[in-house]
């Protein structure tokens, strides 16, 4: 426990906190010198310089107690709010109280004899001005920078804005994954990625190329996006043996030919239909693509001795209220039960990764809000109380890789995504970033299949932390593979009749917690 704490304090992630803390300490220390010079004169200050410094160093420890109690260093300076400023003031007052307490017990030894209460009081006032002024100045200049360099009304391209927006909109520090051990385990491997032209799949493919894998087989049905991916790969990673293939994962003969030809050792399955309102109107395609496509890939992975099969899932699979969420839950159940099935599985380790919304992904709320702001509004939010878990695309991909090297088969890995974010707050922040104050927010009501709150775990799913602190393993209910396989066969047969009502009934038989307003 203590070793983990110490290693974090010495890590790169802790550097911003150290910078803020050291800056605040310097402000307090300089304020003490200025306060003494103002009250006693510069000549007296220079005459008693050494003893003054000793006193200020001693006082500094008391102020550090206040900083630690109120965590003045934990916030992001450019996002400082009134509570952040109030914590800075309270921290200084607590430090001052400790100093006065020590003065009463050690009237001679603790303090420099000429340093009076009036000097301490002025030091605290100057420190308040300095610390709060630093935070307000950083916030003001950052706002001016955004207005000037982000085009004021999102005038720049989406690619230019992406990094700027993502880091500012996510109310937590980015997750940094140690890629060194991951690279060591993936180096030289033959890897197949489905959905390789999508938001997650494309970034995942680039991360894999950076791991110096032996061979990459990238599959997607979007021809234009795959062409762009192919050109980018050849330019950035010319030394990687990369195959870009345009096909549908549901084409059984084509997929079998690819498995037989390339013999992948690891499969990352990121291909899926994902838009909730769209799939509510197209339950047939959600089953034929998401469920049947996953089933075909999983069976091919077993047949061709794939070592690991990693499926990308979603928090919408937890207590699903949408066709999309239920289809992904069925995929989770199938992969997990196949992994535990014994003789039906040749040894392939099936691993599921579950996380929430990815900021900046294709069709995400960020891109929708951005275009609405460019048009002058209104920005449409479904409900003022809707909240979602968010993470960045690089975070999601690196954590998928972490789950790949950590998994032993049958697990559902759940990523710690911090606290959920109110969509309305996200919209307000993006309007602030645009520099325009006349854009209004319009609430349109929940769409079919949507719910106010998403969960990463069901109440019944206890979790245990693995070696990496941002990943947990859900102790999900286990299913008999033969029973599930028969139920999914019937579901797919029903989907091919294009009878939506029967499809929904079959889905609920497999996932009883599926709560759709159709029932």
Image (tube, rainbow, N blue to C red):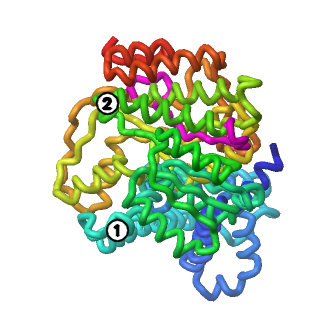
Residue 473 is drawn in which quadrant? top right
Residue 245 spot, x, y in % from top left: 49, 56
416, 345: nearer the viewer: 345
Image quadrant in which the N terminus is located: top right
Q: What's the residue at 21%, 60% (across, down)? A: 374
Q: CA distance from mark 1 to mark 2?
A: 41 Å
Q: Is residue 44 magenta?
A: no
Sequence-first tag of 1 and 2: 1
SS type, badge 2: loop
310 vs 507, left or right, is: right
Q: Callout 1 environment at 10 Å: few (<14), some (14 to 19), or many (20+)?
A: some
Residue 301, percent across and down?
65, 39
Residue 18: percent from the left, percent from the top?
65, 64
Q: Which residue position holds label 1?
A: 146
Please state which of residues 359 and 232 is positioned toward the viewer in this rendering.
232
Residue at image location 76% in from the left, 24% down from the top: 342
**Disc 1 element:** helix
Residue 369 position (above or below residue 146): above
Q: Judge whether residue 115 can be spotted in this image.
A: yes
Q: Which stretch did the figure color magenta? A: 302-323
**Mark on residue 282?**
2
**In the depicted view, which residue is nearer to us: 40 or 37?**
37
Q: Are marks 1 and 2 in contact (CB under 8 Å)?
A: no
For marks 1 and 2, give the one nearer the viewer. Answer: 2
Q: Residues within 10 Å of mark 2 (few under 14, many from 20)?
A: some
39 to the left or right of 46: left
User: Toward which corner of the image does residue 122 lie, by quadrant?
Assistant: bottom right
């Amino acid at each position: 426990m203590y070793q983990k704490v110490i290693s974090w304090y010495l890590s790169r992630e802790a550097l911003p906190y150290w910078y803020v803390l050291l800056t605040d300490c310097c402000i307090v220390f300089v304020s003490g010198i200025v306060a003494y010079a103002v009250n006693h004169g510069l000549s007296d200050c220079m005459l008693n310089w050494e003893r003054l410094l000793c006193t200020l160093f001693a006082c500094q420890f008391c102020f550090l107690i206040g900083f630690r109690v109120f965590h003045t260093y934990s916030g992001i300076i450019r996002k400082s709010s009134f509570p952040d400023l109030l914590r800075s003031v309270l921290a200084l007052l607590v430090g001052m109280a400790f100093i006065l307490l020590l003065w009463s017990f050690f009237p001679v030894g603790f303090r420099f004899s000429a340093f009076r209460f009036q000097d301490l009081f002025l030091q605290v006032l100057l420190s308040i001005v300095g610390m709060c002024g630093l935070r307000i100045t950083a916030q003001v200049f950052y706002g001016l920078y955004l207005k000037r360099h982000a085009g004021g009304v999102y005038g720049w391209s989406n690619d230019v804005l992406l990094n700027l927006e993502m880091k500012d909109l996510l109310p937590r520090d980015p997750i940094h994954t140690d890629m060194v051990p991951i690279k060591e385990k993936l180096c030289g491997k033959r890897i197949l990625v489905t959905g390789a032209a999508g938001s997650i799949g494309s970034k995942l493919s680039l991360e894999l190329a950076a791991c110096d894998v032996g061979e990459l087989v990238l599959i997607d049905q979007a021809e234009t996006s795959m062409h762009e991916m192919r050109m980018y790969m050849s330019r950035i990673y010319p030394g990687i043996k990369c195959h870009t293939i345009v096909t549908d994962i549901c084409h059984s003969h084509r997929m079998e030919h690819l498995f037989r030809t390339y013999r992948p050792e690891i499969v990352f399955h990121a291909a899926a239909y994902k838009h909730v309102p769209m799939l509510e109107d197209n339950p047939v395609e959600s089953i034929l693509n998401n469920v049947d496509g996953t089933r075909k890939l999983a069976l091919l992975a077993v047949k061709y001795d794939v070592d690991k099969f990693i499926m990308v899932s979603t928090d919408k699979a937890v207590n699903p209220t949408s066709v999309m969420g239920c289809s992904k839950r069925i995929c989770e159940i199938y992969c997990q039960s196949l992994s535990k099935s014994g003789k039906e599985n040749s040894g392939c380790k099936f691993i599921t990764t579950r996380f929430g919304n990815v900021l900046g992904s294709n069709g995400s709320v960020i891109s929708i809000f951005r275009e609405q702001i460019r048009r002058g509004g209104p920005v449409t939010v479904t409900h003022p109380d809707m909240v979602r878990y968010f993470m960045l695309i690089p975070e999601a991909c690196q954590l998928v890789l972490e789950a790949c090297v950590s998994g032993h088969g049958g697990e559902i890995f759940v990523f710690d995504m911090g606290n959920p974010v109110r969509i309305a707050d996200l919209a307000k922040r993006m309007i602030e970033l645009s520099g325009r104050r006349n854009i209004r927010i319009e609430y349109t009501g929940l769409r079919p299949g949507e719910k106010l709150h998403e969960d990463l775990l069901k109440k019944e799913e206890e979790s245990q932390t693995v070696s990496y602190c941002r990943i947990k393993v859900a102790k999900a209910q286990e299913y008999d593979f033969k029973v599930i396989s028969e139920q999914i066969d019937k579901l797919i047969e029903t989907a091919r009749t294009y009878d939506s009502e029967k499809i929904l009934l079959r889905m609920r038989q497999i996932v009883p917690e599926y709560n759709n307003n159709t029932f």
